[in-house]
Image: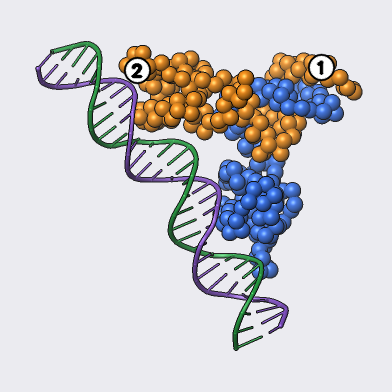
Chain colours: A orange, B blue, C purple, D green
Amino acid sequence: MENTSPLKPTETELEILQILWQHGPSTVRFVNEEQNKAKETGYTTTLKLLQIMHEKQLVSRDEESRSHVYQAAVTEEETQQHLLGRFLDTTFRGSAMKLVMQALGNHRTTPDELNQIRHLLKKLEDDSPNADS
Amino acid sequence: MENTSPLKPTETELEILQILWQHGPSTVRFVNEEQNKAKETGYTTTLKLLQIMHEKQLVSRDEESRSHVYQAAVTEEETQQHLLGRFLDTTFRGSAMKLVMQALGNHRTTPDELNQIRHLLKKLEDDSPNADS
DNA sequence: TTCTCTCTACGACTTCTTTCGTAGACAAGT
DNA sequence: ACTTGTCTACGAAAGAAGTCGTAGAGAGAA
């Protein structure tokens, strides 16, 4: 149960992971086409990236058919968690609260979402032995 | 308002900015010594970085005395805001709520901090009906 | 079979970032 | 005046990330 992967995906690798998370196992061709929706990218560029990510164990691949099928080998949540930790340290010097305040304050959030957060707050309070009001 | 500097500091530049934000205007020597507390860094490395940051207008400098005195030219908040925006998009596909939930859920937050957030939530709710500016 | 299309592999090039060596200026101290 | 220490400027090396050209294999159509 030890470290699954202290590996930090780069900017582009993350974009590819997003595609794999959203669409499930995909061929290079498919990933490339998705990437092109946002930004023109050569086919071999995508291929190379996926190969590197495979080496880094960020993705796994099925080589059965001629076109290999790639799949994310890390979950979206664990990756987000990991990146969030780093971001928190480097940008907010570790203060989760400052980050949350800024995120809530400057990005529109629907009333419903605010409610969900309220629920979470309540839950956190209940779990915490020494909560004062 | 239309400032032309949505420049994104690099990892190391951010570290230096943190030092300047925390300690105010500083000489290269001082910044370098602060950096060394975390990681051994050559003096000229720090110098070069500050010079580059000066070119990029991330810092300003006072050249009066022989040892120049550098000062952050961007505020901590605006930088955090900018980086947060990027991070939100690339890592959480724009969902501020998901980010907040994860931040609150997985990083220790004191009861007092939870309270501050609660206050913010209330404030957001009050302001929200017709927000558009 | 032969031609054509698509795929993987691989290596080289570019750009960006970080690191550092070296040179010249300048102020003190002796 | 000379030596020493600290400073800036500059250029170049080292590293990291992303980009792409080219070669060769295989599959299917003609």
Residue occupying the point 81% across, 17% down: A127
Residue A109 shows up from this direction:
no
Q: Relative to A72, does residue D20 appear above or below in the rendering?
A: below
Q: Relative to A92, does residue B112 appear above or below in the rendering?
A: above
> Disc 1 marks which residue?
A127
The disc numbered 2 marks a residue on which chain?
A: A
| A129 on left or right of B72 | right
| C18 on left or right of B15 | left
Question: N-terminal of the two: label 2 or label 1?
Answer: 2
x and y percent of residue B74 in the render?
Answer: 66, 48
The residue positioned farthest toward the right in the image shown: A132
Q: Relative to C6, does residue C17 appear above or below in the rendering?
A: below
Quadrant of the rendered image containing residue D27: top left
Q: Quadrant of the C terminus of chain A?
A: top right
Residue occupying the point 86% across, 19% down: A129
Residue B103 shows up from this direction:
yes
Q: Relative to A130, does residue B43 appear above or below in the rendering?
A: below
> Disc 2 marks which residue?
A67
Check disc 2 and report its element: helix, strand or loop: loop
Spatial separation of the CA atoms under disc 2 and disc 1: 49 Å
